[in-house]
């Protein structure tokens, strides 16, 4: 893959093989986020888990102290009074069965997170083939299948994000934006790493966290010193 001049210049500014402390890594990633838009700062954690085994699957959610810097659109599947609750909490879209054909047939996906009350999961389950591959399926572990739609919507709007293993056993999550201060990014990073450390499967033998990299949307990745990040 051919990289642009800015990327190549950024790579020359630090040692790509070295492992940095959190503060140094955040400083480098911010410095190298030179695109004309506000780049997202991302965390990539390579684990020693094998996601093919159910007991080694990692999935959870955490509220970042300073949010993600992105306005998140929330769709809530509910009925009765829960529809009004969701609307009052600030959900962008609220509805029930009538939304199924819009998503299934018209390809409507103008939302970032889907919340559903448990009594609506039979309906939402019909969208598994559409929502599943996009990581949008509501899940109790992520707090998106709940009767407390007010708390779910409030948490998501406040900066709640979901973390999970991908097929290569890596966790990819946003830490914030390049415009955030180093302190804000550090707070968000520590909150995320704390949650990921706590999610270590008890059945896992061997090293849990193999490598941790911070990067911006267009910039090079900066490796972190893993030994200082593991509880």
Image (cartoon, helix red, strand yellow):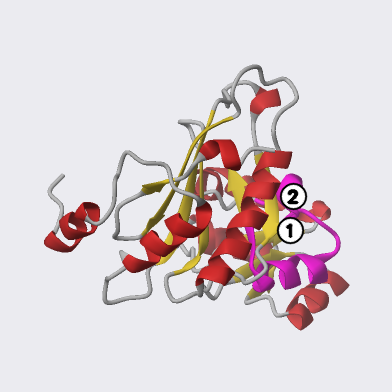
Q: Is residue 157 magenta?
A: yes
Name which of mark 1 and mark 2 comes first in the sequence: 1
The secondary element bearing badge 1 is classed as strand
Task: Count all numbered tags in the image, as a single digit.
Answer: 2
Task: Classify mark 2: residues with Cα within 10 Å, few (<14), some (14-19) or many (20+).
Answer: some
Q: Position of residue 90 (x, y in %)?
A: 70, 80
Does residue 195 sit above or below 205 in this rendering?
below
Q: Which image quadrant is residue 33 in?
A: bottom left
Q: Is residue 129 magenta?
A: no
Left or right of residue 1: residue 158: right
At horizontal 49% and vertical 74% (from top left) the residue drawn is 180
Task: Classify mark 1: residues with Cα within 10 Å, few (<14), some (14-19) or many (20+).
Answer: many
Numbered tag placed on residue 116 in the rendering? 1
Image quadrant in which the C terminus is located: top right
Q: Position of residue 41 (x, y in %)?
A: 44, 61
The stretch of residues the image draws in magenta is 138-161
Q: Do the residues under discs 1 and 2 have CB atoms within 8 angstroms?
A: yes
Left or right of residue 33: residue 74: right
At horizontal 20% and vertical 53% (from top left) the residue drawn is 12
Does residue 197 sit above or below 181 in this rendering?
above
At horizontal 16% and vertical 44% (from top left) the residue drawn is 1
User: Disc 1 vs disc 2: which is toward the camera?
Assistant: 1
Frontmost residue, 10 versus 48: 10
The secondary element bearing badge 2 is classed as helix
Q: Which residue is mark 2?
A: 121
Left or right of residue 16: residue 60: right
Does residue 57 sit above or below 128 in this rendering?
above
At horizontal 67% and vertical 21% (from top left) the residue drawn is 204
Q: Position of residue 171 (x, y in %)?
A: 53, 42
């Amino acid at each position: 893959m051919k990289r642009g001049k800015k990327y190549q210049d950024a790579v020359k500014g630090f040692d790509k093989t070295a492992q940095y402390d959190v503060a140094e890594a955040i400083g480098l990633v911010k410095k190298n986020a030179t695109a004309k838009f506000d780049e997202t700062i991302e965390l990539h954690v390579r684990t020693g888990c094998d996601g093919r085994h159910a007991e080694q699957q990692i999935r959870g959610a955490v509220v970042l102290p300073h949010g993600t810097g992105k306005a998140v659109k929330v769709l809530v599947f509910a009925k009765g009074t829960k529809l009004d609750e969701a609307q009052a909490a600030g959900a962008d879209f609220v509805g029930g069965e009538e939304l199924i054909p819009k998503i299934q047939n018209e390809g409507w996906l103008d939302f970032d997170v889907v919340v559903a009350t448990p009594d609506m999961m039979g309906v939402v389950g019909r969208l598994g083939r559409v929502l599943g591959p996009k990581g949008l399926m509501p899940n109790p572990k992520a707090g998106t299948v709940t009767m407390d739609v007010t708390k779910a919507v409030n948490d998501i709007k406040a900066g709640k994000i979901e973390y999970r293993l991908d097929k290569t056993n890596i966790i990819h999550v946003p830490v914030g934006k390049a415009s955030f201060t180093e302190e804000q990014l550090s707070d968000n990073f520590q909150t995320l790493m704390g949650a990921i450390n706590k999610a270590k499967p008890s059945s896992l033998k061997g090293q849990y966290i193999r490598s941790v990299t911070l990067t911006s949307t267009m910039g090079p990745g900066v490796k972190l010193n893993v030994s200082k990040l593991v509880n």
